[in-house]
């Protein structure tokens, strides 16, 4: 179990080696989208447009898509979850990962105080849920056991992004601060983020069809 700074950045080589080994190991990543224990600096999990240490003008690149990268092995169980958005999906993913006889990784979105949530951390579950509805954090499960059984291994567990992204971003200082200081740049980055999220949902839906077993 570790954070995104370890999983996406400084420990990624080791994480990749372990998951690629095929050994029966379960990994849980608590993703706060930054180095929370040292002040909220940018990690490769930090999303496009976010203001943090080393990205005072908004991060100009999207986050590293760790989950879908690990899916490429085809024999690693992969899930992206958010407890505040869908508790049932989170529990199902953890149970499936534990039952899978092979490497598994579950990546959980974990709102952090460094996000600067305007209602305080007591509202973090609601804010996380709004993020999932806006497409900010995709929910999916990739279970290789289903492919062995002749079933589609990929399940997309969230709907197409709604129009709530701007409201979601406005509730966090890490995005709202740039909007107040440099509105033009913030709107450009937020627009690019919206396009990326819509494209990610479309790609996941296409991948579901790609993994569908051929009918006899």
Image (tube, helix red, strand yellow):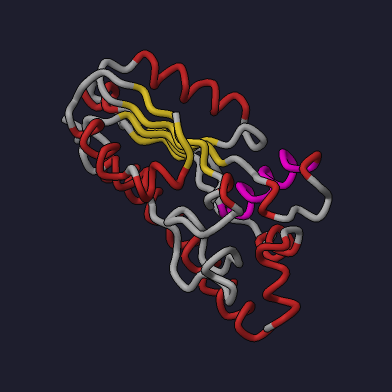
Tell how many labels. Answer: 0
Quarter location, residue 37 = top right
Magenta span of residues: 123-136
**Residue 129 to residue 183: above or below:** above
Residue extending furthest toward the front: 38
In this rendering, would 132 be left or right of 94? right
Q: Percent from the top left, x then y, of residue 74? A: 22, 35
Residue sitting at x 38%, y 48%: 8
Magenta residue check for 133 = yes
Residue sitting at x 45%, y 40%: 156
**Residue 87 to residue 64: above or below:** above
Residue sitting at x 26%, y 38%: 14
Q: Percent from the top left, x then y, of residue 216? A: 16, 30
Q: Percent from the top left, x then y, of residue 208? A: 34, 42
**Residue 83 to residue 166: above or below:** above
Residue extending furthest toward the bottom: 184
Q: 24 or 202: nearer the eye?
A: 24
Quarter location, residue 73 = top left
Q: Percent from the top left, x then y, of residue 60? A: 48, 73
The N terminus - image quarter: top left
In this rendering, would 67 be left or right of 23? right
Q: 50 or 155: nearer the eye?
A: 50
Residue sitting at x 69%, y 66%: 166
């Amino acid at each position: 179990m570790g954070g995104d700074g370890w999983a996406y950045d400084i420990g990624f080589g080791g994480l990749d080696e372990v998951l690629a080994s095929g050994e029966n190991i379960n990994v849980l990543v608590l993703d706060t989208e930054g180095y929370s224990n040292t002040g909220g600096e940018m990690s490769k999990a930090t999303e496009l447009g976010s203001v943090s240490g080393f990205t005072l003008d908004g991060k100009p690149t999207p986050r590293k898509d760790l989950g879908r990268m690990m899916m490429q092995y085809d024999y690693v169980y992969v899930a992206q979850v958010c407890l505040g958005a869908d508790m049932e999906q989170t529990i199902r993913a953890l149970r499936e990962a534990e039952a899978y006889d092979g490497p598994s990784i579950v990546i959980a979105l974990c709102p952090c105080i460094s996000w600067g949530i305007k209602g305080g951390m007591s509202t973090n579950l609601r804010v996380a849920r709004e993020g999932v509805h806006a497409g900010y954090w995709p929910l999916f499960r990739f279970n290789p056991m289903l492919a062995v059984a002749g079933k589609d291994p990929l399940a997309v567990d969230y709907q197409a992004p709604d129009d709530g992204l701007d409201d979601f971003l406005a509730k966090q200082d890490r995005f709202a601060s740039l909007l107040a200081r440099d509105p033009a740049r913030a709107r450009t980055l937020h627009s690019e983020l919206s396009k990326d999220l819509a494209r990610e949902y479309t790609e996941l839906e296409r991948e579901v069809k790609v993994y569908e077993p051929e009918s006899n």
